[in-house]
Structure formats: C-alpha cells, structure tokens
Image (cartoon, rainbow, N blue to C red):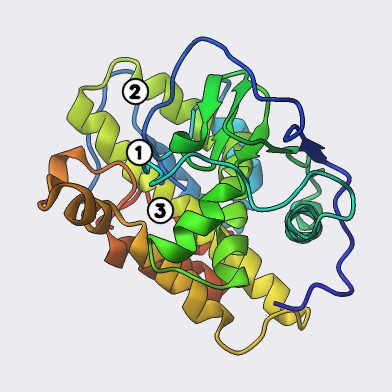
Amino acid sequence: MRLDNQRESSNVEDRRSSGGGFGGGGFRRAGMGGGGIPLRGGSLVTIAVLIGIGWLVFGINPLHMLSILTGGGGYTDSQSYQPSQPSGGTAASGQNDPGRQFVAKVLGSTEDVWSEIFASANKSYQPAPLVLFRGTTVSACGQASSASGPFYCPNDGKVYIDLAFYDELRSRFGAPGDFAQAYVIAHEVGHHVQDLIGVLPEFNRQRQTASRAEANEMSVRVELQADCFAGIWANKTDQKGMLEAGDIDEALNAATQIGDDTIQKRTQGHVVPDSFTHGTSAQRSAWFKRGYESGRMEACDTFSGSI
C-alpha cells in the first residue's frame, strides 16, 4: 500500500506508555463481525426494504434514509482470538513510531474517503478517534484487553487496537501484509459508519428482545456490512492510486482467515454455525469483494435476502 503521500490522522490516541487500565463490563464477540428474521419491536429487514425502495425508485441516498428510519443505541464490536503470548506490542510509543505512523495514515485515508462519501449526500462525516493500547485499557464499553482483538465502541465512538494483534494476524492466522492490517482498521471504521447512519443503534435496540440465535444472525449481517464498507474504502483508495499489486488479495485472505468457521476449526476442531457472529470465511471475503468492486453503499445491503 502506498502511504508516502497520505496525511496522518490527528485522531490517534496513544495509550501504550500509560500502563493499561482496568474497568468493568465485557465485550460481545462480534467481529472485525439467510433471509430476514421477524423480531419483536420491528425488523432490520423491514428497514432494509424501505432503504432499497429509496435507492431503486426515488434515488434517495442511503445515508439520508437511515438517518430518518433509525435512532439511538449502541453496539460493541470485538472478536476474541486468544493471543498465543502476552501482548507487548511491536514498537515503542511516539510520533516517530512506524506502527503509529502506519495506523495514523490508514485512519487518515478512511477519514478522507468517508468524508467524501458523506459530503456527496450533503452530510458531515464525524471521524472516529483510534486508541492504541498495550495489554489492557479502559473504554466506554468496559475493559479492553489484547484478547478482545480490535473493536469499535459506540459508547465513545472510538476504535481500539493493540498492535500486537498484527503479529497474531501474520504469524498465527496466516494473513501477512500491510493491506491486511489496513483492512482491519477499515472494518472497524466501517462499524463507526454504521453507528453514524443508524445501523448499530437499531441492531442494539432489537437484540434486547431477540433470542440468542436471532441476535447472532443479525450480528453476522452487521459484520458483513462492515466488511463491505471496508471494501468501499479499498475501492476509493485504489482510485487514488494508493494500492499495489497483491493488496486486495491480502485483504481477502485476512477476511478468510478470520471467518467464524475457520477460527472455530482452528481453535476447537469443529464448527457450530448457530454460534457464528461474524460470518463464514466465504461470506466475509465475498462481501469485502462486493464493496470493492462496486464502490457503492447500496451494494452493501446485507439485511435483505440471503447472505
């Protein structure tokens, strides 16, 4: 990935030298997340149908439709991956730290892309701060640890990541490459976009009365849409001449390696489909690819039909 000319985001909060922190709460396993399920109190599928009508018939931008149809709430995005060794990070804190610079530039590129997309709908994009931590830290969603993996907390609108996860991504999950790492950030920022346009608040509202199976299926759809949004970001960065040969393959491989089925096979030797919260390897890579090939938000409707 070509980042030499990319500005660094000013929204990076580096806590790696603070010694971590402690707090209450916990994280729902939902990852770096067929058909609609009728749910009490409304349905995401009903919303998706209305949004689809707006796209196809009236040409209404999905950002506007979602802002009208959904309301407040929250969602905690994290995927436990059980690090093989204690997290220590791979670089020291500081403005000249290559790891921090990489994250700041990728975050800056997501801000540029989504600001342009929102502006096209006469909306203002509110960037998500990104917190770098080592070991443990405190978020508005509770205590975070390296075992949580990267996650987005809607209660404070921040993305959290321990850079040691990138070591695991490369060595344990078999997903090397700088664009695989960038995909992780883009996915979490995708959740922030979902929060801004109302998808996460609506999911949070509905899962309060949903069964575990219903909530898991909705979670998969939320996660796959975040993958699709990451694909849209990849499309726009490609148009800016920032991608290199093999970058998309790195992202697709990463999406494959962190699919629910692949992780369960790796960690427990068998899969339990009813427990999936992120989507299979095939689904995750397919939805990222759909976002990348289309570059359009309306292509990322994971709430209608089969996935």
- At numbered mark 3, what does the secondary structure look like: helix, strand or loop? helix
What residue type is disc 1 on?
Ser
Where is residue 176 shown, x and y percent of the image? Answer: 50, 71
SS assignment at label 2 = helix
Callout 3 environment at 10 Å: few (<14), some (14 to 19), or many (20+)?
many
Q: Position of residue 229 (x, y in %)?
A: 56, 57
Q: Report x, y in % for residue 44.
A: 38, 36
Q: Is the C terminus in the top left, top right, bottom left or bottom right quadrant?
A: bottom left
- Label 2 – label 3 distance at C-alpha: 17 Å
Q: Earlier in the sequence, mark 2 or mark 3?
A: 2
Structural crowding at the residue carrying mark 1, measured as other residues with C-alpha within 10 Å and reported as few (<14), some (14–19) or many (≥20): many
Residue on which disc 1 sits:
219
Query: Which of the two labelled residues, at mark 1 and mark 3, occupies the earlier sequence position?
Result: 1
Instruction: Name the residue tied to disc 2.
Output: 207
Q: Which mark is residue 224?
A: 3
**Tag 2 and tag 1, C-beta contact below 8 Å:** yes
Q: Is residue 180 left or right of residue 282?
A: right
Percent coordinates x, y for residue 132 in the rendering: 70, 39
Q: Nearer the viewer, residue 231 or 303?
A: 231
Q: Residue 66's image quarter?
A: top right
Q: Residue at x 62, y 70 (%)?
A: 178
